[in-house]
């Protein structure tokens, strides 16, 4: 039995106003090629198919086209909902996609748990049993009780999740006995486990009040395919519990990671081999930091390395200088005139921002409410420019409403 484990596609993500549509299309094309080349029997996507609950139409189109294309490979596709996914959005096409050899599990119902899914090999014989567990929303797992402390809620949620996994595992054991076959039992999950290393792009990292789930509470599955953490990694140095990571870097701090999908081979009920298939870097992201001279040197090295390639490098530039340079943006623009470069983020080093603010020795009486807001805004790094614009708009509306109420009171 051969399976590909992937997760956290985040279709529809805007990266500082930049669309990732082309990168995602290139990844899906690459993934289809791997499915054919490696003769894969099943693909598991462990959550966060989309970046938001209301994905743009092109993201839905990418998703639907992939489902249609994978059907021709005779590969079974299992889609799990993540914390970024809307249950309603995934469920709206669930019945239709079932006709295309695709199973969608958007959420759980503890009263009527999802039965284990039989994953078939190319010869149509059972190859594995899958406990398909999506993102577990607290409201689906526990009922809040009056007077419960935060620790009580956290403990109750942890117990509920552990119990759900145990019941799923027992159901799989019963089904395997009924089928009378010697095949592995696999589980999925979209959560944070203790010891997992995260990146800047991982949002809403906690499951309700549960900060992280202890991997020792998992039953003895033969493989656990996890999603939610974008950095590919093993859990607790275990070879059979893995985060596949996101297929493209979703923040600048992920740009140094080698993105991959997990190719899993089973022989009967044993995990025979786990291979990481490296994903090509479809869009170059680089972070440069230092003085203006150091940044110029780094840009020269990038130009030498990639000058012959038909590509554009998205840059995150952090300038460290003790001097107040009012023309810092102009200087960076002069350094990045080449069509090879596109500056996505330009900022001062945090220490320099704080030092400059202290040196200015301004008092609140000298500043307008908008000045204070702008200073605070400069200290925060937003995931997208849209987030910054949205917050600025809301702030201005709030100030205008407050001023209007003050005028009316007079």
Image (spheres, rainbow, N blue to C red):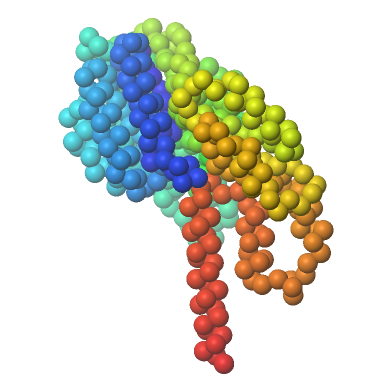
What residue occupies the far bottom of the structure in this picture? Answer: 410
At 39% from the left edge and 26% from the top edge, which residue is drawn?
27
Image quarter of residue 35: top left
Q: Is residue 1 visible?
A: no
What is the x, y in percent for residue 9? Answer: 41, 33
What is the x, y in percent for residue 16? Answer: 50, 45
Left or right: residue 364 versus residue 280 is right
Q: Height in image: 199 above or below 301?
A: below
Q: Nearer the viewer, residue 342 or 318?
A: 342
Tell me the quarter of the image containing the N terminus: top left
Q: Nearer the viewer, residue 229 or 309?
A: 309
Tell me the quarter of the image containing the C terminus: bottom right
Q: Is residue 42 visible?
A: yes
What is the x, y in percent for residue 86? Answer: 35, 46
Q: Nearer the viewer, residue 246 or 229?
A: 246
At 64% from the left edge and 37% from the top edge, which residue is drawn?
335
Q: Height in image: 406 above or below 299?
A: below
Instruction: Report the number of numbered marks.
Output: 0
At 27% from the left edge and 37% from the top edge, which residue is drawn?
61
Left or right: residue 222 versus residue 231 is left
Image quarter of residue 251: top right
What is the x, y in percent for residue 72? Answer: 21, 19
Q: Nearer the viewer, residue 268 or 122?
A: 122
């Amino acid at each position: 039995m051969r399976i590909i484990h992937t997760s956290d596609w985040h279709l529809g993500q805007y990266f500082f106003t930049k669309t990732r549509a082309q990168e995602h299309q290139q990844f899906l094309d690459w993934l289809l090629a791997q499915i054919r080349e490696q003769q894969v029997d099943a693909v598991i996507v462990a959550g966060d198919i989309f970046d938001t609950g209301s994905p743009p139409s092109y993201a839905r189109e990418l998703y639907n086209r992939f489902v249609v294309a994978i059907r021709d490979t005779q590969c079974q596709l299992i889609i799990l909902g993540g914390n970024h996914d809307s249950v309603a959005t995934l469920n709206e096409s669930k019945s239709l996609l079932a006709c295309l050899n695709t199973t969608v599990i958007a959420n759980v119902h503890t009263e009527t748990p999802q039965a284990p899914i039989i994953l078939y090999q190319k010869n149509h014989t059972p190859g594995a049993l899958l406990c398909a567990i999506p993102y577990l929303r607290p409201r689906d797992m526990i009922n809040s009780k009056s007077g419960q402390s935060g620790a009580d809620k956290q403990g109750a949620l942890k117990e509920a999740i552990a119990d759900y996994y145990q019941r799923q595992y027992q159901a799989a054991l019963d089904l395997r006995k009924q089928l009378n076959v010697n095949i592995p039992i696999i589980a999925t999950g979209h959560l944070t486990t203790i010891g997992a290393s995260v990146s800047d792009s991982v949002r809403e990292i906690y499951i309700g009040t549960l900060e992280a789930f202890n991997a020792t509470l998992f039953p003895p599955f033969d493989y656990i395919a996890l999603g939610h953490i974008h950095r590919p990694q093993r859990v607790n140095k275990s070879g059979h519990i893995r985060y596949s990571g996101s297929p493209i870097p979703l923040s600048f701090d992920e740009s140094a990671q080698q993105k991959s999908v997990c190719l899993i081979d089973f022989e009967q009920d044993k995990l025979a081999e786990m291979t990481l298939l490296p994903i090509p870097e479809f869009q170059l992201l680089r972070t440069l930091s230092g003085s203006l001279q150091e940044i110029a040197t780094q840009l020269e090295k990038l130009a030498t390395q990639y000058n012959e390639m038909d590509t554009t490098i998205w840059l995150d530039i952090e300038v460290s200088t003790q001097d107040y340079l009012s023309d810092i943006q102009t200087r960076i623009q002069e350094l990045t005139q080449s069509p090879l470069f596109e500056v996505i983020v330009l900022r001062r080093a945090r220490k320099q921002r704080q030092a400059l603010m202290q040196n200015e020795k301004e008092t609140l009486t000298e500043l307008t409410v908008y000045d204070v807001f702008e200073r605070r805004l400069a200290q925060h790094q937003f995931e997208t420019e849209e987030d910054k614009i949205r917050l600025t708009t809301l702030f201005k509306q709030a100030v205008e409403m407050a001023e209007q109420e003050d005028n009316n009171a007079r």
